[in-house]
Image: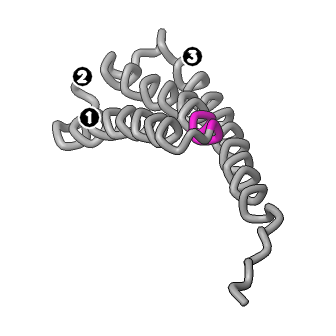
Amino acid sequence: MHTLSIPTWIIHVSSVIEWIVAIWLIWTYGELTNNRSWWGLSLAMLPALVSAMCACTWHYFDNAESLEWMVTLQATMTLVGNFTLWAAAYLIWRSTKSVNTAEPKPIKSEQ
């Protein structure tokens, strides 16, 4: 655990905690709005969380050579996470587009 300074550890750990809170808040927003696209975003955030946890774990064990496979897993999860976040953003955009392009109701005249 000597490879990172205390302030760097604070940043690493708080970033992971913030990401977990963000996943929970986005899931809750999806429940409140009854829009499953937001649930998709919260699930799409999980690979990035795994990536961050791999980095923290590798650093915790002083960047041990026996755990170098975690660097590959972290890079893979970052790549997968980027694509899942892109897909989730697209689904949210598409869901809002279908709401915005709905046929407007005619306004009744009071004449």
Look at the image and tell me in which quarter the C terminus lies: bottom right
Q: Which mark is residue 69?
A: 3
Q: Position of residue 54 (x, y in %)?
A: 46, 23
Badge 3: few (under 14), some or many (20 or more) residues near its Cα, within 10 Å? few
Q: Which mark is residue 1?
A: 2
In which quarter of the view is residue 7 placed? top left
Look at the image and tell me in which quarter the N terminus lies: top left
Q: Position of residue 91 (x, y in %)?
A: 73, 46
Q: Amino acid at mark 3?
A: Trp
Of residues 101 and 108, the one drawn nearer to the viewer in this rendering: 108
Q: Amino acid at mark 1?
A: Leu
* Furthest-bottom residue in this view: 111
Q: Amino acid at mark 2?
A: Met
Of residues 7 and 97, the one drawn nearer to the viewer in this rendering: 97
* Disc 1: which residue: 4
Q: Position of residue 39 (x, y in %)?
A: 57, 34
Q: Magenta span: helix, strand or loop, mainly? A: helix
* Furthest-front residue in this view: 111
Please check the rendered image and state whether residue 39 is part of the magenta-colored stretch, yes or no: yes
Mark closest to the chain's N terminus, 3 or 1:
1
Please state the extent of the stretch shown in magenta in the rendering: 36-41
Relative to 74, say whether 92 is above or below: below
